[in-house]
Image: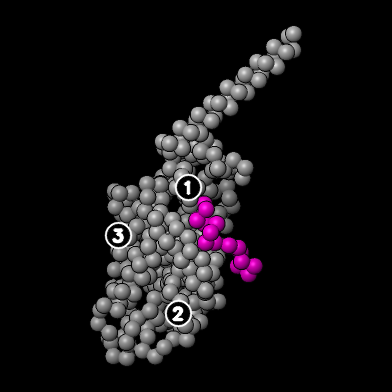
Amino acid sequence: MIRSKIVRRLGLLVMSATLALVVAEIALRIVDPFHTGEVLAREAFEHAILESHWEFAGPVLRPNVSAEFLGHEHRTNSARMRNPEIPVEKPSGVFRVAVAGDSIAFGWGVEESDCFPRVLERMLNDGPKPPGIARFEVINGGTPGWGIPGYAYWLKNTGLAYDPDAVVVTFINNDLTELIKTVEGDAAAPDVLVLPGWCKWSYVARAWQNVDALWFGARGDLALALKSNPQVTDPACDLACQGLEVTRQFCGERPFVVVDTLGDEHGSWLPRFVQDLADRRIARIDAFLPLADYQNRFAVSAIDVHPNAAGHRLYAEWIHAWLRAHAIPR
């Protein structure tokens, strides 16, 4: 008798806990305070457009795929680029700019027409054309998840085959994070709860992950992301500059510029970084979007700090001005 009562109570306890989880799951799906729907959509989007490559130890874009994210279509061409199909051989009278970058150059969460390589191309073609130049082409080699090794890999194996007349490379926040982890190990990065695959669909599990991330200060919004980054050290700074110098060397005598979106939120190391680039004769564009009201002015969504169309427009304007001053014949 006692045993059966214990079994019944355990059964009621399990049923009550299950019912509570079901109610919580439904409530979270309706209210979605952590924007879990967008997180799941982002993960499905990443799976649709990215794959591992046998030669490159990291993600590459899948060729000839199309996927929607944040209401915008993202389409790749046969050469694994978010770019219209373009012949490798450069036609006469064409001035080409190759852009090596990550998800920002790729145009994460914006229409292809709004990502800065396409905006830059329109600006160049709408402006004056020097003698001998009939058209400008901007080749977008941006791939989500890439850092300096990816930029160098793409230029060496793909981008330079298009014979660009100038090369633009982005350098952003998570490029530094990866370098710091390389120098100091994974312990330098903030801890984030990793969910097992079987429960990733659950809004309750995702809520717990978000609470854990908030507790450890590792949430993905811009201000907290910058603050939670490990301290930039001299070895990491040196490694960044060395990597950019190697990337530039691949490009030979072509005009080469680094688009630095970091700003001074990383502390006193930035002047040293800027000076080191100058000592290596690497041109730099200061393309920092101000943190003040960033989420409302420049973020693609409430939880995604990738730049929106307005941010891409500013990047294009800054790069356009540099190219006109330093790379395009007058």
- Residue to which mark 1 is pinned: 39
Contact between labelled residues 1 and 2, with CB atoms less than 8 Å apart: no
Amino acid type, callout 3: Ala
Residue 205: x, y in percent? 54, 37
Rendering quarter of residue 254: bottom left
- Residue to which mark 2 is pinned: 86
- At 27% from the left and 84% from the top, the residue drawn is 129
In the visual, does 6 lie left or right of 135?
A: right
Is residue 114 shown above or below 166? above
Q: Earlier in the sequence, mark 3 or mark 2?
A: 2
Amino acid type, callout 2: Ile
Kindly report the distance in space between the C-alpha atoms of the residues bearing marks 2 and 1: 33 Å
Kindly report the distance in space between the C-alpha atoms of the residues bearing marks 3 and 2: 27 Å
Is residue 234 shown above or below 169? above
| Quarter placement of the N terminus | top right
Which segment is the magenta one? 43-57
Q: Is residue 277 visible?
A: no
| Residue 143 lies within the magenta run | no
Q: Earlier in the sequence, mark 3 or mark 1?
A: 1
Nearer to me, 75 or 103? 75
- Residue to which mark 3 is pinned: 310
In the visual, does 132 lie left or right of 5?
A: left
Amino acid type, callout 1: Val
Is residue 45 shown above or below 243? above
